[in-house]
Image (spheres, rainbow, N blue to C red):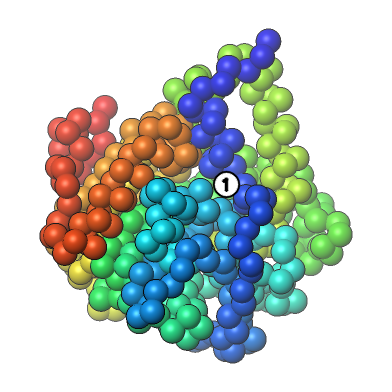
Amino acid sequence: MPIRKTPAMLALGAVLLATPAFAQAPQVQTCQLGELRLESGQMIPNFRMTYITHGTLNADRSNAILSIHGLRGDRSTQTPWAGPGLALDTTRYFVIQPDTLGVASLDPNATTSATRSGMNMSFPRFTMRDMVNAEYRMVTECLNIRRLVAVTGTSMGGIAALQWAVSYPDFMAAVIPLVPQAHANRQVNFIWESARQAITLDPKWRDGAYPNDDRPLRGTGIGMVIQNAFGMSASGFEGLFATRDQVHRNYAQQIEQIGATTQARDWIYRTWAIESHDIAAAAPFNGDLVAAARSIRARLLLIPNCFDQLLPPGESGVMMVAMHAPDAKIVDIDDPSGHGGTRSARGIAAITTETRDLLQRVADGRPGFGGPRYPRHWSRPDRCPG
């Protein structure tokens, strides 16, 4: 029986697997930053960041947008949002897409990671704030940009975008996090520890000292499929698959595809950064999420999905941030494809419309946002419906 092609299926294929895009991309550029000091006090020597750009930087360097990829993504993953007439209109904006710290791609020349540094599991652990600080240095030191129009990102990139709003509150006019979290919740700790265990129990893991030509492919695939199972809602799975056999075939295909395209060591380091993250953890907030939200000075357009079981907007603090940030709007994708809903038809339409409207208001010097601050189908601002 053929698999029914539904919006949920398209979302799963496009985003839930978070597969890097392989279409022809702009030239890869490299930013050499020397030593990168981490929050822990440790240093990463000879740190570099790679990135691509779309559009043209104007004469006064004032039309740039930073677009940040997710956990398994790379510099090209955000490209579907950038182009003439798209959410990030490249006829108007200069869109920067970096390979973020520890990127888990197989490109040997990409941004510094545990694998590319040669340090493997001796590489220092880093935080989301370390990632954001590295991005800030890339933008200011290599591109000589002193202010951004906006920072946006998906999943882990959305988490980073929200951290940008707290760490560098005056550096951009708008922040647009897609399916983000403000802090990790206990379920996500469980999910990523389960995924890591699946990888490290693969005999080819070898305590993380595996050679690149004999990676723990099966454990890597299984671990990430564990994550994916939480990304989509139960109703999303029902819409995607008609039979149990279809589920099993898709499971096997995902394991093979993900294992073949992901550097397990680097992916593990990045999960440690996500699951320990809290935008309020650092001084001066010391764990006070409300205070961290109130410190945000950019316009904040939060776009979660209430069907998302990987980064649920209530338990991950996103709704609390929306309630207390001075100039914020929250838009619910409201799509059964869950964490992958950013690339469903509903998600693409909502994100494109809301992003273009906000960027136009910024360009025109108009305050605030268009439309209601909270989704009309919500009965209360601190909890998803249902």
Q: How many marks?
A: 1
Q: Position of residue 309 (x, y in %)?
A: 42, 38
Q: Position of residue 326 (x, y in %)?
A: 14, 62
Give amino acid for label 1: Ala
Viewport quadrant of the N terminus: top right
User: Is residue 61 shown above or below 256?
Assistant: below
The 10 Å Cα crowd at callout 1, few under 14, some 14 to 19, many 20 or more, is many
User: Is residue 17 shown above or below 326?
Assistant: above
Q: Is residue 269 visible?
A: no
Q: Secondary structure at mark 1?
A: loop
Question: Relative to 66, is 202 on the left or the right?
Answer: right
Going 21% across and 50% down the picture, which residue do you hit? Answer: 329
Which residue is the site of mark 1? 18
Q: Position of residue 226 (x, y in %)?
A: 59, 40
Name, please, the residue furthest toward the bottom.
Answer: 34
Instruction: Tell which of 359 and 196 is nearer to you.
Output: 359
Name, please, the residue furthest toward the right.
Answer: 213
Instruction: Tell which of 232 and 347 is nearer to you.
Output: 347
Going 34% across and 74% down the picture, which residue do you hit? Answer: 62
Name, please, the residue furthest toward the top.
Answer: 1
Q: Quadrant of residue 336?
A: top left
Q: Position of residue 88 (x, y in %)?
A: 40, 55
Going 64% across and 86% down the picture, which residue do you hit? Answer: 46
Viewport quadrant of the C terminus: top left
Instruction: Tell which of 185 and 307 is nearer to you.
Output: 307
Q: Is residue 138 visible?
A: yes
User: Is residue 70 shown above or below 19?
Assistant: below
Question: Relative to 249, is 336 on the left or the right?
Answer: left
Going 67% across and 31% down the picture, which residue do you hit? Answer: 251
Q: Quadrant of residue 76?
A: bottom right
